[in-house]
Image (spheres, rainbow, N blue to C red):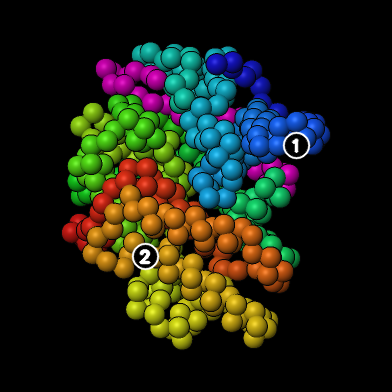
Amino acid sequence: MKTLDRIPTGKIERASKLVSTGVKLGGNYIKYIGDKIIDPENARENLDQENAKDIYDGLKTLKGSALKVAQMLSMEKNLLPSAYVDRFSLAQFSVPPLSGPLVRKTFKKYFGEYPEDIFDTFAPESVNAASIGQVHLANKNGKKLAVKIQYPGVANSIGSDLALVKPVASRMFNLKGQDTEKFFKEIEGKLMEETNYTLELAQSESIREKCAGIPNLLFPNYYADYSCEKILTMDWMEGIHLSEYTKNNTDKEKNNRLGQTLWDFYMYQMHILRSVHADPHPGNFLITDKAELIAIDFGCIKEIPDEFYVPYFELSNAKAINDIEFFTEKITELEILRDDDSPEAKKYIVALFHDMLSIFTFPFHGETFDFSDSTFWGKIASISDRLANDEYLRKLNGNRGSRHFLYINRTFFGLYNLMHDLKAEIVVDNYKCYI
């Protein structure tokens, strides 16, 4: 894979790259108009393929928060055509890496030494590269280590990047109207936290310690002596990415065990820690040859305040779904219903969100749930299509929901997708065994 000797860091230079990408998309659309006449059956799919490639190619050279948006979008399987999901999923662990000289320069800047002076061995080629940083294999005192290096200029460009990709982010998070600032501040704050590797080290060690009692779950050790704000060193963990594992494994017993581990890990964080790893994509989980789950990358941690946690999870109870007065009270607490909504709008919103939450909370309504249930996923796809094409909802003023929905919903959608990939059957409240 071609390496990068530099990354555009200036606002104008990064904006120019996105403009040039926009020009390519315009050319693709002109071609699409002709294709509709010549090959109408495949014209739209061809347009999606070309656009997905050009957008991803533009973002992968920018890296940082611009590419992070693509990574987030790759998890929204019901939002975008498959061409975009497939292409953007490369942002999880496969983008052009920094060149060796730029890696050495980064080490020299933060440690005053080159990596080969710090470690016994250090591989100059990265083993994987994602949106914010890339990972190198190193060795120290006979121990294999993974060294994550952040791309230069990532933190400084977050604000300007978000302004440039706001239209994409607005679609991804379904943000409309004038009252969007609280949502974008939430996104910007979390992206800033992800660029602080000193914070990530502390968060990683905290979760590793607090979740140590969950069986079949492994974490790397972290090394403060070889870490700083932009470089993070941890154990090298042997395993394959969860997405690679699910492509080839059909062992139901193993998949159920992995699914239960993953589910318990998230429910324990949600309900006991009230703080959750809010980036559940396949690149952040490895599977060992013993079918153990390895959790990595704790840069994005979402704290769950009581004022959101209580009504949010009260709505996951089937009894709450069946009590429309209680249901209305809770979605008002969660800022889904607004004071300035008309009686007609309130009636419509209550009915819509009742239908939606009846489906999304269904895994919590019994003692067990099977994520291979095709009927459940059919209903998910149906409600997603309904939301995407709901003209009345688009016309309603303002945005719906607390700012905390952004990362909590993202966490659940990501978790549901991983559980679907595993096709796991789980015991819903099994996490309580580890309290």
Q: Quadrant of residue 101?
A: top right
Residue under circle 2?
Answer: 362
The mark nearer the N terminus, 1 or 2, is 1
Front-most of residues 58 and 224:
58
Q: Residue at x 59, y 38 (%)?
A: 84
Residue under circle 1?
Answer: 36
Q: Which residue is drawn at 64% across and 50% down?
A: 169
Q: Is residue 238 left or right of residue 400?
A: left
Residue 187 seen in the figure? yes
Magenta part of the protein: which range? 137-164
Which quadrant of the rendered structure holds the N terminus? top right
Q: In this view, does 228 lie to the left or right of 55?
A: left
| Residue 43 x/y as whole percent | 69, 35
Front-most of residues 114 and 34:
34
Give the spatial CA distance, label 1 vs label 2: 41 Å
136 vs 261: above or below: above
Asked if marks 1 and 2 touch (Cβ < 8 Å), the reply is: no
